[in-house]
Amino acid sequence: MLLLEGTFPFVSGGVSSWVHQIIQGFPEIRFGAIFLGSRKQDYGKLRYTLPSNLVHLETAYLFDDQENPPIVPVKAPAETMAMVEQMHDLFENDLKHPNCAHMFAGMMDEAGPDGKIGHDMFLYSEGAWDFIKKSYRRRSTDPSFVDYFWTIRTIHTPFWRLREVAVKAPPARIYHAVSTGYAGILGVLLKHRNQRPFMLSEHGIYVKERKIDLYQAQWIKDNRSVFERDPSRVSYFRQLWIRFFEHLGYVTYQASNDIVALYEANRQRQLTDGAPPERTSNIANGIDVEKFAALRADWPDGPPPIMCLIGRVVPIKDIKTYIRAMRIVATHLPQAEAWIAGPEDESPEYARECRELVTQLGLENTVKFLGFQKLTELLPKVGLVVLSSISEALPLVILEGYAAGVPTLSTDVGSCRQLVFGLPGEDEALGASGRIVRIADPQALAQAAIELLGDPVEWQRARASAIQRVEKYYSQRLMFDRYQALYSKNFAWQA
């Protein structure tokens, strides 16, 4: 059972493509999937054709408008509130206590209508009200109790929905989450309830990505006056949300039988965030090299003067830096074009701003928004695959470009440096398969593009390194073999 938060099959992108690839790569295994989303209206139709061995698909929306339990007097037993307070004290002061994850799972067992911590008790009991007041006095540095009260309600409400999902979920021999966060916590609950193994694969580090989102979020309140605000300190409610996701990540790591990162830097981050070292490993993404290798036929001697960013038009991809870089590139290489191949519906306001920037810079004939494209049709026309992101893990589009013979130009995020320069040893000896530049630096991005597109010899050298690197280290067969070993071990696991 795959546990998926905001990805396959309703959202396209690298993680969703990987999920689709894994299901298809093991036709002998029957998969199920539980998709967790925010609200139903935030998602459209299926973005993928469901493989025949995906035999169960369930959707749950954690922040949809739902009817609360009827408002009636509810009594919170003193021993129950003592347990709740002990759990929160561990989260706040002793997160690495050995009982932390077990106590959390046990409390979630009590979160149903027949348990000691039902949703009605949280909403309506005097004991819960007193605990929220006490927590506000002890911990909050924001003057608004009203905002604190509603933030606590918002943070806790999804747990009752997750318990409903866990109770209704069909049994599986392995539960496999593709992130921490809510999907990871669902895995914790399912392992606890059914005594079956729970695996975790992280493409990006979920907590890190949520921190980026939360630092940028405009909806988080800060009620301090201008005289009370210290620019060097994050507002209390922002800190509260960040700690919440840190706690979810820690509990998920502690419950996981196996914890997979895409590359070593992310594994080290997992260790820092509480993952037990003996359960961690690295399995790099892999692609169908043969599928893209066929595109190398009849390739021109020099690079096509086309830069292409393949990805969603969302802030984390920093499309605006890419557009600004193209203003510089166009001055030196007038024949060059910058393509953007990806959906614009996830963040329509940002997409509109990007199009307006193109107009402001006079690049209407140079920068082209293509929408979703088939890579097998797109890559033979491209001279450089470009990523200007402020956060990535191990991007499949770089590997797919490599297999087609297209070098890459990327910001220094995730494993991109490893993909361009190789790991120490034989991989590094293959040479650079592109360029790496700093985040949010249009000048550096433009200069690197000019160097590669303007020098056929250097471009051919990078192209050769790209092909050798992907064929030797990033084939999907290698990835499948490593996951087969993990699945086989966990199929044999006994609680």
Image (cartoon, rainbow, N blue to C red):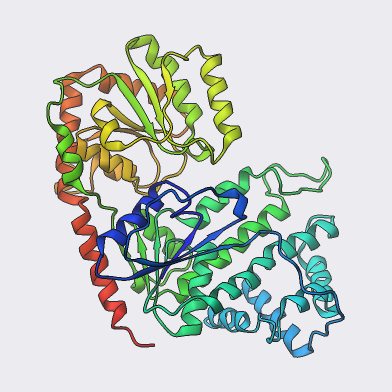
Q: Residue at x 26, y 20 (%)?
A: 453
Q: Residue at x 67, y 76 (%)?
A: 89
Number of numbered labels in the structure image: 0
Q: Residue at x 20, y 40 (%)?
A: 292
- Image check: 301 left or right of 106? left
The percent coordinates of residue 413 (x first, y second) are 40, 42
In the image, residue 100 above or below residue 42:
below
Quarter containing the C terminus: bottom left
**Nearer to us in this view, 206 or 475:** 475
- Image check: 305 left or right of 9? left
**Nearer to us in this view, 65 or 19:** 65
**Nearer to us in this view, 171 or 85:** 171
> Is residue 179 among the parts visible in the rendering?
yes
> Is residue 430 among the parts visible in the rendering?
no
The percent coordinates of residue 379 (x first, y second) are 27, 32
In the image, residue 466 above or below residue 188:
above
- Image check: 201 left or right of 356? left
In the image, residue 148 above or below residue 489:
above
**Nearer to us in this view, 101 or 12:** 12
Quarter containing the N terminus: bottom left
The percent coordinates of residue 338 (x first, y second) are 38, 22
The percent coordinates of residue 162 (x first, y second) are 59, 71
